[in-house]
Amino acid sequence: MIRLGELRAARGAVKKNKRLGRGAGSGKGDTSGKGHKGLLARKGGGRRLGYEGGQTPMIRRIPKRGFHNFTKKNFALINLKQLESSGLKEVDLAALRKANILKGNETLLKVLGIGEITKAITVKAHQFSESAKAKLEKAGGKVEVIDVRG
């Protein structure tokens, strides 16, 4: 049976600290194992992330192309023929996702005029094409434009 006074850490678990700058006899005196001069010998010295010894870093060698518009609005697009076959009375982004018609993660909805519609349905979207708006109103449906800023 092991006694409380006989408990010790596992072999190699306890390691003595490296005592730097404590005289020549210690083997780590004078320059404290940092060598003479240079970047790594300095206080707080060290290379920054991505530094490659002075050669042009990878991030600057890789070509960058085009313009990335950070204000671009991504619309989920739906056609009238899809609305006709959906069988929904009131259509908005949430209803289309619930009916598994739209699967993306876009936050804006645009209705396009491809196909015909015969049912009178209410459609709430952020944008409508002119032909979609005309066809929906001709079928007796209601068009509600949601403010993009809101």
Image (cartoon, grey):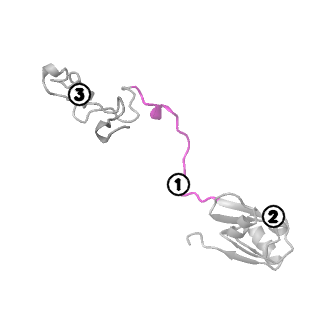
Secondary structure at numbered mark 1: loop
**Number of marks:** 3
The reply to whether the magenta stretch includes residue 72 is yes
How far across and how far down the image is residue 111, in percent? 73, 66
Q: Amino acid at mark 1?
A: Phe
How far across and how far down the image is residue 30, in percent? 15, 23
- Give the residue pinned by disc 1: 70
Real-space CA distance between mark 2 and mark 3, rounded to the nearest whole angstrom: 69 Å
Q: Amino acid at mark 3?
A: Ala
Secondary structure at numbered mark 3: helix
* Residue drawn at point x = 26 percent, y = 30 percent: 16
From the viewer's perspective, is the residue at label 1 or at label 2 nearer? 2
Question: What secondary structure characterizes most of the magenta part?
Answer: loop
The reply, left or right, for residue 64 in relation to residue 91 is left
Instruction: Tell me whether circle 2 and circle 3 mark residues in contact (CB < 8 Å).
Output: no
- Give the residue pinned by disc 3: 41
Q: Amino acid at mark 2?
A: Gln
Label drawn at residue 82: 2
Magenta residue span: 55-74
From the viewer's perspective, is the residue at label 3 or at label 1 nearer? 3
Q: Residues within 10 Å of mark 1 (few under 14, many from 20)?
A: few
* Residue drawn at point x = 54 percent, y = 52 percent: 69
